[in-house]
């Protein structure tokens, strides 16, 4: 089966848990702890190596897109679900039939200035992002190629796609 064309995503992280600075320091991380079935399906079934990621600081002031990443390992079982000592432990998840999945991502760049929700709303293309829709709370969500390009244009950074 031929590989699908590159896809684009937005991953939310609270900066007091894992910030863009933490990511820049570590350079690579597994994206664990996602406990929503729709987001899990994206991680498990859709994301592929080479897909691009917008890194978003949620529950922050300001909430903003702060950088980019690349998926370097496709979906695999989220081991944190099996560890009773982990905050993301799920007693119903079973290693023989895992419920939750994660991907590995690699740091690409940190934006010199955060790209805020207001800046996105004021752009004709970016204003359509799922991130800005009422009730949209997914921590992992798709982004269109046009939205990806708009974010780079607004942030004044080179598009690595």
Image (spheres, helix red, strand yellow):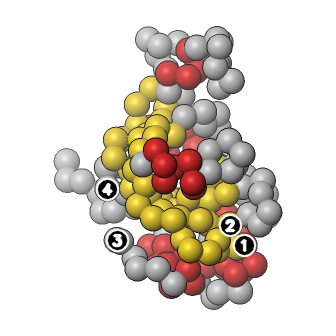
Q: Which residue is depicted at the point 68% across and 41% down?
A: 17
Q: Position of residue 108 (x, y in %)?
A: 41, 61
Callout 1: helix, strand or loop?
A: helix
Question: From what the image shows, is residue 66 above or below residue 3?
Answer: below
Near mark 3 (Cα within 10 A), the count class, few <14, some 14-19 or many ≥20, is few
Quadrant hosting residue 100:
top right
Q: Are marks 2 and 1 in contact (CB under 8 Å)?
A: yes
Q: Is residue 69 left or right of residue 86?
A: left
Measure the C-alpha gap from mark 4 to mark 3: 9 Å
In the rendered image, is residue 26 in sight? yes
Q: Are marks 4 and 1 in contact (CB under 8 Å)?
A: no
Mark 1, residue position: 117
Earlier sequence position, callout 4 versus callout 1: 4
Closer to us: 29 or 8: 29
Q: Position of residue 122 (x, y in %)?
A: 71, 86
Near mark 4 (Cα within 10 A), the count class, few <14, some 14-19 or many ≥20, is some
Mark 4, residue position: 50
Q: Which residue is depicted at the point 72% across and 55% down?
A: 58
Q: Is residue 88 left or right of residue 9?
A: right
In the rendered image, is residue 45 in sight? no
Mark 2, residue position: 64
- Residue depth check, mark 2 versus mark 1: number of the one nearer the observer: 2
Mark 3, residue position: 161
Q: Position of residue 15 (x, y in %)?
A: 68, 50
Measure the C-alpha gap from mark 2 to mark 1: 6 Å
């Amino acid at each position: 089966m031929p590989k699908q064309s590159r896809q684009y995503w937005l991953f939310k992280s609270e900066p007091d848990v894992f910030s863009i600075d933490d990511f820049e320091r570590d350079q690579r991380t597994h994206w664990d702890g996602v406990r929503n079935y729709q987001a899990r399906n994206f991680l498990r079934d859709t994301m592929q190596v080479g897909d691009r990621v917008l890194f978003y600081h949620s529950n922050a002031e300001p909430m903003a897109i702060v950088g980019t990443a690349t998926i370097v390992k496709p979906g695999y079982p989220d081991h944190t679900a099996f560890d009773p000592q982990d905050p993301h432990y799920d007693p119903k998840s079973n290693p023989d039939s895992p419920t939750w999945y994660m991907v590995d991502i690699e740091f690409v760049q940190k934006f010199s200035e955060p790209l805020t929700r207001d800046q996105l709303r004021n752009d004709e293309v970016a204003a359509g992002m799922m991130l800005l829709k009422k009730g949209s709370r997914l921590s992992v969500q798709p982004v269109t190629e046009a939205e990806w390009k708009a974010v780079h244009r607004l942030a004044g950074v080179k598009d690595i796609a």
